[in-house]
Amino acid sequence: MHFTITTSPVDQPKAGLRAVGLFHKRKLGAQATVLDEVTEGRLTGVVKAGELEGDAGSTLLIPSAAKGQAGSLLVGLGSRKAFSAKNARKAWSALAKVLVARPVDTVAIGLEDLLPPDQDIGWLVHGLVAAIGDAAYRYDTYKRKEDVKPIRLKTVHLCVTAEQASAAEQACTEATAILAGVNHTRDLGNAPPNVLYPEALAEAARELAQQHKKLKLTVLDEKALEKLGANAILAVGRGSERPPRLIALEYSGGDKDAAPIVLVGKGITFDTGGISLKPGAAMDEMKYDMCGAATVLGVMTAVSQLKLPLNVVGVITSAENMPDGRACRPGDIVKTLSGQTVEILNTDAEGRLVLCDALTWVERFKPKAVIDIATLTGACIIALGHETSAVLGNDEGVIAALKQAGTTSHDRTWELPLWEEYQEQLKSNFADMANIGGRSAGTITAACFLARFAEKYPWAHLDIAGVAWKSGKQKGATGRPVPLLMRYLIDQSAA
């Protein structure tokens, strides 16, 4: 799908459908008024007939009056005086669903009235592109063609004022790159686990590196991990016929000597829980336990497309957690890459094990900051639901920047404490630490575990267990937190 910015009024671009705003009590917006004049009062007539009141998120399709003319789509915005970001999101979400359902190739959208007074045009462009991209996304690789309803929409013209054009163009460039990253993340997350496993993730990274000259790929296989001493990663993957991998993509967009920002993604391509076997219900969703890794590849896609003036390293630590005769057991003790020992009390707390070796390995990059991304704890869903990611870490600057980026992108985070007192829960009688800390504060103690391996650089941890995918009728990967991390990286490049 192609998005363009134009300073033409909404009636000018060639399109099969033109979308404009309607405020509460049937008040046409500025662009709707333009369209009404062109259609000789057709919009006014329909509105006066009481077909649409203008409540936020309501829509009304007005067919064209003559062959060859474009149809009109009225989108309810709510009260003009109280027009807010919340109502704007309702409007563009409803708009997006209608657009992708219509049999039209090209649409034009008048943005003037869709912009709340406390927001800028960049915010609106980012939101609209994301909403239309979300509505248009399909994962139908394994469906019969006759069962798939194609989406005809190919081009979206976003109509802005001359004063808004420059900022809108920049936002559109950013938003389309982020959408490409989100969709790549969703495709990887939705892929079945018999197709996407650690070696396949490495191949996906290889394909990405081949597309962009500024990307350098490193893949450590099982033998290389053994030689390295990454025993925690190896322990998790030992029960699977699919051997683990540590994958790194180095993007060089900044000064040669500039310290990179490192992203570390958890890539458990399927999580049975291992010997500590999970319940069978909804276990199919454990293919999404690699969404942290998918996020890293999505971000590297968008970063490369935007050619950000930063050095960024994307690291994926990947394994399949299976209950084989060789699998690690509760009670096993492993020596991690850092030299610290871990008593494995629960093999279903495997994400922190693959991450801890990766957090030690990335010290070689002398990073400016390290952010790990992981579907780490069910406790995070209990604490925060499905609206926000948890963020914890050892550097308030990094955490504050992530929180601000989350607010801007509406891909939000909520900070949880990482106090020393919580470390007490990880005590072991037989090793330096246990891999679980009991039922209470599960998200926090998981981060406390990781903190022991991230002491040599500024670090933040994103627990995305509640936001990486949806269950039920809307089951599927969401692509989060690619928007959050891209906003953070764009902000860092601007700074």
Image: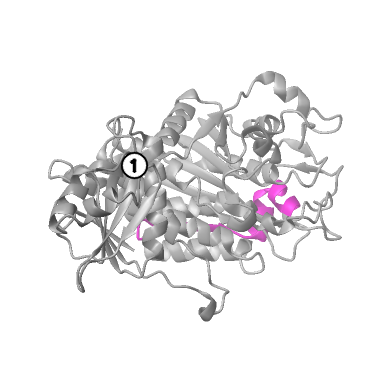
Residue at figure coordinates x 35%, y 60% from the top left: 213
Could you say which is closer to the camera, residue 140 or residue 393?
Answer: 140
The quadrant of the picture occupied by the N terminus is: bottom left
Q: Looking at the image, is 142 positioned above or below residue 95?
A: below
CA neighbours of label 1 inside 10 A, class few (<14), some (14 to 19), many (20+): many
How many circles with numbers are drawn on the protein? 1
Q: Is residue 28 left or right of residue 180?
A: left
Residue at figure coordinates x 61%, y 57% from the top left: 473
Residue at figure coordinates x 69%, y 54% from the top left: 226
Q: Looking at the image, is 137 positioned above or below residue 292?
A: below
The quadrant of the picture occupied by the C terminus is: top left
Residue at figure coordinates x 83%, y 40% from the top left: 345
Q: Looking at the image, is 255 positioned above or below residue 226?
A: above
Q: Is residue 17 left or right of residue 327?
A: left
Q: Is residue 219 magenta?
A: yes
Q: Magenta part of the protein: which range?
A: 212-236
Q: Callout 1: helix, strand or loop?
A: strand
Q: Position of residue 294 (x, y in %)?
A: 53, 54
Residue furthest front as drawn: 49
Q: Position of residue 370 (x, y in %)?
A: 50, 37
Q: Is residue 348 left or right of residue 132?
A: right
Q: Is any part of residue 204 visible from this angle?
A: yes
Q: Position of residue 330 (x, y in %)?
A: 86, 44
Residue under numbered circle 1: 77
The amino acid on which the numbered mark 1 sits, given as a three-letter code, is Leu
Q: Is any part of residue 253 visible from this angle?
A: no
Q: Position of residue 366 (x, y in %)?
A: 47, 37
Q: Is residue 112 magenta?
A: no
